[in-house]
Amino acid sequence: MPATNWQEKTDPGEAQRLEGYAEQLREMQRRRARGGTVDRALHAKAQLGVLGEFSVLPNLPEHARAGLFASPQSFRAVVRYSNGSGARQDDRKADVRGIAVKLVGVPGKKVIPGMEAARTQDFLLIRSASTPFRSADEFVPFVMAAASPLTRLPGVIAKLGFSRTLQIIKRATKQFSEPVKPLAATHYFSAVPIRFGAHAVRYALRPVAADTGAARSKSPDYLGDELAARLRNQAVTYDFQLQFFEDEKTTPIEDASVDWPSPYLTVARLTLPAQDVSSERGKRVTELVEKLSFDPWHAQEELRPLGNMMRARNAAYRLSTQERKASPEPDGSELP
C-alpha cells in the first residue's frame, strides 16, 4: 500500500501572500483586456475545445478507489487544449502547453464554499512532469517579469538570488522550447498533487497514439488544426494515470519542481470520439468551452488539491473567473 503520512505545510502569512499574487495576476488580466474582452489570466489561447468521455476502469486495487474512482463508471467530459501564456500567441512560439478536463455529472460534496453541490470535477495538466518553480513565491514573480522583463527581472533576482533565478530560466527555457508532438500524442502531467482518499497523488494523461515526431508548424494555429483534422476521422484516447506519494524526500507535497519517481497506475481512460469542430455542433462546443472555467478546486472532497502551488491556484483562479464573468458550472444539460 502507498504511504499515507503525507502532509501539507503552510506558513502563517501564506494565505494573505497568495491573495496578493492573485490580485497581481488579475491586474495583468485587466491590462491586457484594455477595456475590451477579458481573457483568462493564463492559458488565454485555446488550441481546441471538444467533448469526450471519461471511463473509470474496473478491478482497481483498493488504494486506487477514492472519490469518483471508487467504482467503474463513465462521465461526459468537456476538454480544452491551450497554450500557457496570458496572451493569445502563435502556436510556433515556445510556451507551456496544457489540457483541462471537466467531468460532468459527478456526485458528492465539492470543495469550494458555495459550490458544494456542483456536479463537476476538473483535472488540469501541462506537458511537463514538474515545474521549474518550487512554489508560487517563485512562479508569480516570473510571470509578472515575463510581461515586463526590463523593469521586473531585477526584482526577481533580488528576491530569489542570481543563482536560483538562472536555474529557473535555464530549466524553463528547456521545458518550454522542446519540440511539440501532435496534441493526440502529447503526454500531459498534473505536475502538482491532489489528495486521493487517504493517499496523495499526481496524475497524468498518457496518449495511446503512437506518434513520435514533432508536429509540423504550418500556421499560427497548427496544433489545434492538426488535432481537429485528426478528430474528423478518428477518436483520440488517453490513459488517465496516478503516481502515489511515497515519502517527503522523493515525492514532496510542497515542492513542484521535483519529478516524482513513483510508478504510474492506469485507473481510467479519456476518449475523444470523432467529431467535427467546424460543424454547427462543434462551434457550440467551442463557445461553451471558452465560457466555462477550469479549476483544480472544482473537486470532490476526496480529491482536494494539495501543496503551495495548488493553494495559490485557489485564489488566482477565483479572481480570474470573476474578472471574465465565466459561466456557472454545468450540470450536463448545456452539452450539445
Image (spheres, rainbow, N blue to C red):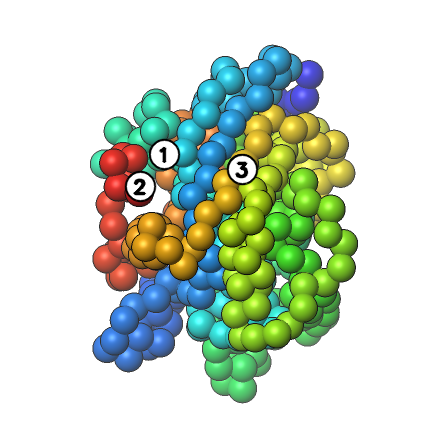
Residue 44: x %, y % from top left: 42, 65
User: Relative to 190, is 135 above or below?
Assistant: below
Q: How many marks?
A: 3
Residue 176: x %, y % from top left: 65, 65
Residue lying at 26% horizontally and 29% vertically, measured from the top left: 117
Q: Is residue 316 visible from the viewing direction of this image?
A: no
Residue lying at 46% horizontally and 39% vertically, measured from the top left: 52
User: Relative to 305, is 199 above or below?
Assistant: above
In this view, the residue in front, 324 or 310, is 324
Q: Amino acid at mark 3?
A: Thr
Q: Quadrant of residue 245?
A: top right
Of circles 1 and 3, the one toward us is: 3
Closer to the chain start, of discs 1 and 3, is: 1
> Are the residues at dot 1 and dot 3 in contact (C-beta closer than 8 Å)?
no
In this view, the residue in front, 132 or 90, is 90
Residue lying at 28% horizontally and 79% vertically, measured from the top left: 34
> Are the residues at dot 1 and dot 2 in contact (C-beta closer than 8 Å)?
yes
Left/right placement of residue 99 relative to residue 60 reads: left
Closer to the chain start, of discs 1 and 2, is: 1
Residue denoted by label 1: 104
* Structural distance between the alpha carbons of marks 3 and 2: 16 Å
Left/right placement of residue 247 relative to residue 72 reads: right
Q: Secondary structure at mark 1?
A: strand
Residue denoted by label 2: 335
User: Relative to 159, is 319 above or below?
Assistant: above
Q: Amino acid at mark 1?
A: Val
Residue farthest front in this picture: 233
Q: Secondary structure at mark 2?
A: loop
Q: Amino acid at mark 2?
A: Leu
Quarter of the picture containing the N terminus is top right
Closer to the chain start, of discs 3 and 2, is: 3
